[in-house]
Image (cartoon, rainbow, N blue to C red):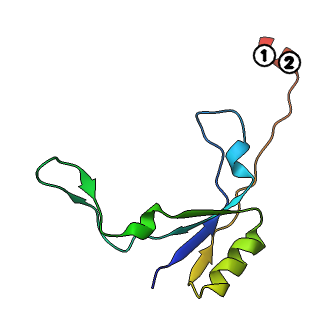
Amino acid sequence: MAYARIYRPTKSAMQSGVRNTRHWVLEFDPEDRLFVEPLMGWTGSRDTRRQIRLRFPTRDDAVRYAQRHGLPFEVLPEHARRHHPRSYADNFK
């Protein structure tokens, strides 16, 4: 049986925006190892659940989905966003 993780994504370090952090994600833990295909050197896997990433507007919706489908799941704690308000003049001190 596939084990699911439910979490809220963190802000990307490459962007200043928080666009993809407002929803909750349900992902499955990998059940099979990755392997290197000998002819081309591509990485492959027999586990297709690794490709599934479901998005939900709230945590409760994601939990309800997992319970309705009988999936064992774990809800990871939400990371609080720290905001340090500063004035524009602080850039020149």
Secondary structure of residue under mark 1 = helix
Residue 7's spot in the image, x, y percent? 64, 64
Image quadrant where one finds the C terminus: top right
Task: Write down the quadrant of residue 16 in the picture.
Answer: top right
Q: Are marks 1 and 2 in contact (CB under 8 Å)?
A: yes
Residue shown at the point (68%, 47%) measured from the top left: 20
Q: Which residue is mark 1?
A: 91
In the image, what residue type sits under mark 1?
Asn
Residue 77's spot in the image, x, y percent? 68, 66
Q: Which residue is mark 2?
A: 88
Give the alpha-carbon distance from disc 1 to disc 2, as whole Å: 6 Å
Secondary structure of residue under mark 2 = helix
Residue 11's spot in the image, x, y percent? 66, 45
Q: Is residue 28 visible?
A: yes
**In terms of depth relative to the viewer, which is nearer, 29 or 92?**
29
Eyeballing the image, is 50 above or below 68?
Answer: above
Residue 15's spot in the image, x, y percent? 64, 33
In the image, what residue type sits under mark 2?
Tyr
Eyeballing the image, is 4 above or below 42?
Answer: below
Q: Is residue 93 visible?
A: no
Residue 47 falls left or right of residue 49: left
Residue shown at the point (81%, 37%) measured from the top left: 84
Badge 2 local density, few (<14 within 10 Å), some, or many (20+)?
few
Residue 1 falls left or right of residue 7: left
Task: Write down the quadrant of residue 76 in the picture.
Answer: bottom right
